[in-house]
């Protein structure tokens, strides 16, 4: 099946056109600056040069039109007819408590996504715009929503409840949801495959370390706890987000500095984390450069970053009652030798022994632990688009089966 995978943000749309049989992205690209004066579409057909088109792309509908047009283009396209797009898979950030798996985007499902807008005011509206625009241009093509939260939503109440009055959970759905679900699911399944064992018998900790960072405890293939919470702000230190802290801190700062709710939100989400602590950058490559040049604040930021990962490894090992593998993924997890090494230092007592040589030379999907290590350590590049494409295919096939049986 050929699936168009879309990740629609407020001013950008990322896409991949994936053949689920070969698992190859036949084309990938991005539309940026939607609604601004000179929007840009970059498009790379498989095995060919990247092209760049600048145009006036006023809204998501025009952006989708451009994406379809470039896929059909005689010079840079990969299909001859719109009908070759068998299905569309959309990344949807927040599925609330409604969705524990991907779903065909029927009117009822769209309403449920709308009902969850309050939980993800920055993301779900853009996702909805993208879905509507795609339905407009591909009215007969099945569309599926794949939710960032779905993989985590069946975690036990002891992991998702916060210590606030229970009525507030009931009234406002305030609980831990967790994010990066497609990535945690994908890399944990890949780790099980690399170990040659059924995921049902494995206890795996996954660390998705990108601009946003989160970890998950995957016990028997199910996420039983994760570091991000009600929003993607909780847990690990991130590029610009604070992660865990005493909630009183923000109340105190708001009082002292006279910050509004919106300003406090910006402080925690945009000016904290690596950029806040280092005062240098939110980008780990730049932070690592600064550390090499002897920058103390940058070194502190890296220290806090790795210490949190280590703490959660301990916590999740306890939560699962054991550990078989740790997986690093995301831009930092896949590429930073230093972060992997520091996060796993002194964990030999847990059975984690990193092989320095393998760590320093890691590429592709690879086990970087010593052969004597009881716990395997993997570097596994994430592939959220492929998960979305495969999920989309599965849902479309399931729906077709249901329809046929009803006839
Ligand atoms: P996003 O979460 O936006 O998808 P990525 O997964 O691409 O982001 O991760 C971006 C992060 O990965 C940045 O902090 C970047 O500095 C970091 N990164 C990328 N390559 C390296 C590298 N070679 N060494 C250290 N960090 C890296």
Image (tube, helix red, strand yellow):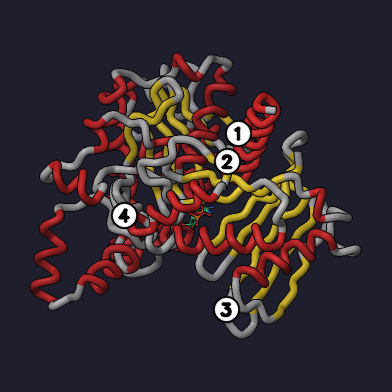
Query: Mark 3 or mark 4: which is in front?
Result: 3
Vertical relation: 5 (above or below) 283: above
Q: Which element is circle 1 on?
A: loop
Q: Which residue, given by chain and number where applicable, does mark 1 sit on?
A: 365
Q: Which residue, given by chain and number where applicable, does mark 4 sit on?
A: 233
Q: Which element is circle 3 on?
A: loop
Mark 1 crowd level (few <14, some 14–19, many ≥20, 10 Å Cα): some
As measured in the structure, the alpha-carbon distance from the residue carrying label 4 to the one carrying label 2 is 23 Å
The residue located at (39%, 31%) in the rendering is 223
Percent across and percent down for residue 93 are: 46, 51
As measured in the structure, the alpha-carbon distance from the residue carrying label 1 to the one carrying label 4 is 29 Å
Closest to the observer, 242 or 112: 112
The residue located at (67%, 72%) in the rendering is 62
Quick check: 33 left or right of 25?
Answer: left
Percent across and percent down for residue 98 are: 39, 41
Closest to the observer, 111 or 41: 111
The residue located at (36%, 62%) in the rendering is 240
Query: Mark 4 or mark 2: which is in front?
Result: 4
The reply to whether callout 2 and callout 1 are in contact (CB within 8 Å) is yes
As measured in the structure, the alpha-carbon distance from the residue carrying label 2 to the one carrying label 1 is 7 Å
Dividing the picture into quadrants, the one containing residue 78 is bottom right
Which label's residue is closer to the chain start, 3 or 4? 3
As measured in the structure, the alpha-carbon distance from the residue carrying label 3 to the one carrying label 4 is 28 Å
Which label's residue is closer to the chain start, 1 or 4? 4
Name the outermost residue toward the bottom.
37
Q: Is mark 4 within 8 Å of ligand 1?
A: no
Vertical relation: 106 (above or below) 256: above
Q: Which residue, given by chain and number where applicable, does mark 2 sit on?
A: 381
Dividing the picture into quadrants, the one containing residue 269 is bottom left
Using the image, tell me which numbered label, if any, was put on residue 35. 3
């Amino acid at each position: 099946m050929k699936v168009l995978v879309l990740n629609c943000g407020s001013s950008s749309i990322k896409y991949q056109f994936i053949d689920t049989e070969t698992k190859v992205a036949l084309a990938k690209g991005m539309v940026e600056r939607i609604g601004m004066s000179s929007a840009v579409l970059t498009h790379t057909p498989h095995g060919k040069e990247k092209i760049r088109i600048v145009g006036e792309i006023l809204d998501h509908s025009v952006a989708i039109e451009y994406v379809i047009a470039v896929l059909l283009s005689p010079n840079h396209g990969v299909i001859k007819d719109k009908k070759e797009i068998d299905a569309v898979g959309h990344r949807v950030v927040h599925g609330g408590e409604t969705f524990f798996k991907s779903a065909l985007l029927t009117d009822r499902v769209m309403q449920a996504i709308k009902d969850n807008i309050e939980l993800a005011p920055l993301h779900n509206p853009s996702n909805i715009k993208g879905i509507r625009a795609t339905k407009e241009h591909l009215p007969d093509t099945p569309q599926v929503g794949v939710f960032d939260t779905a993989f985590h939503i069946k975690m036990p109440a002891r992991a998702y409840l916060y210590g606030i009055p229970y009525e507030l959970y009931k009234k406002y759905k305030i609980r831990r949801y967790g994010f990066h679900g497609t990535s945690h699911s994908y890399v944990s399944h890949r780790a099980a495959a690399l170990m040659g064992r059924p995921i049902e018998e494995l206890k795996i900790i996954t660390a998705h370390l990108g601009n946003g960072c989160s970890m998950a405890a995957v016990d028997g293939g199910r996420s039983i706890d994760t570091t991000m919470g009600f929003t993607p702000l909780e847990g690990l230190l991130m590029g610009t987000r604070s992660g865990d802290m005493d909630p009183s801190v923000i109340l105190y700062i708001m009082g002292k500095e006279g910050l509004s709710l919106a300003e406090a939100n910006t402080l925690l989400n945009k000016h904290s984390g690596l950029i806040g602590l280092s005062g240098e950058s939110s980008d780990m490559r730049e932070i690592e450069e600064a550390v090499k040049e002897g920058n103390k604040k940058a070194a502190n930021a890296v220290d806090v970053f790795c210490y949190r990962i280590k703490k959660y490894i301990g916590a999740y090992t306890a939560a699962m009652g054991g550990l078989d593998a740790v997986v690093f993924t995301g831009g930092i997890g896949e590429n930073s030798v230093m972060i992997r090494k520091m996060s796993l230092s002194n964990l030999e007592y847990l059975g984690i022994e990193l092989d320095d040589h393998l760590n320093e030379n890691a590429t592709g999907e690879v086990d970087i632990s010593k052969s004597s290590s009881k716990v395997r350590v993997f570097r596994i590049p994430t592939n959220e688009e492929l998960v979305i494409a495969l999920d989309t295919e599965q849902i479309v096939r399931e729906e077709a089966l249901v329809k046929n049986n009803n006839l």
